[in-house]
Image (cartoon, grey):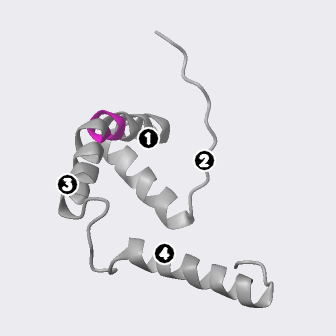
Amino acid sequence: MELPEPVLIELDADLAGALDIEAAELGISRSELIRRVMAQHVADAPKTEPGRWVDRYKQSPMGTISEWGDLDAQLAGAASEALRRHDENGDEPA
């Protein structure tokens, strides 16, 4: 069995207290509880995270107008305005 790598974490008093209670109820150490929770999180993450990003992309793919408006048009307009001011005043574009 591989030896665990020591990791120092800081918790606020409430979270540390909750950790102690949960660990005591399970009859394990704080470290073991954190290892179990993190192992489960890592095991679950690849299944859930990419799916959420794909779902969000399907709701509003790049190049489509979202609740924020037409961002491509807004960016193009802002760039044109900055260049116009530069041409008129010699100002650097913002």
State the residue position of label 2: 9
State the residue position of label 3: 55
Query: What amino acid is at disc 4?
Result: Leu
Q: Nearer the viewer, residue 6 or 62?
A: 62
State the residue position of label 1: 34
Residue found at x 36% / y 41%: 37
Q: Residue furthest top?
A: 1
**Tag 3 or tag 1, which sits nearer the N-term?**
1
- Which range is magenta? 41-45
Query: What amino acid is at disc 2?
Result: Ile
**Tag 3 or tag 2, which sits nearer the N-term?**
2
State the residue position of label 4: 75
The secondary element bearing badge 1 is classed as: helix
67 horizontally vs 4: left or right? left
61 horizontally vs 87: left or right? left
Can you say whether 62 is above or below 46 in the image?
Answer: below
The secondary element bearing badge 2 is classed as: loop
Magenta stretch secondary structure, dominant = helix
Mark-to-mark CA distance, 1 and 3: 30 Å
Judge depth for marks 2 and 3 and give the one in front.
3
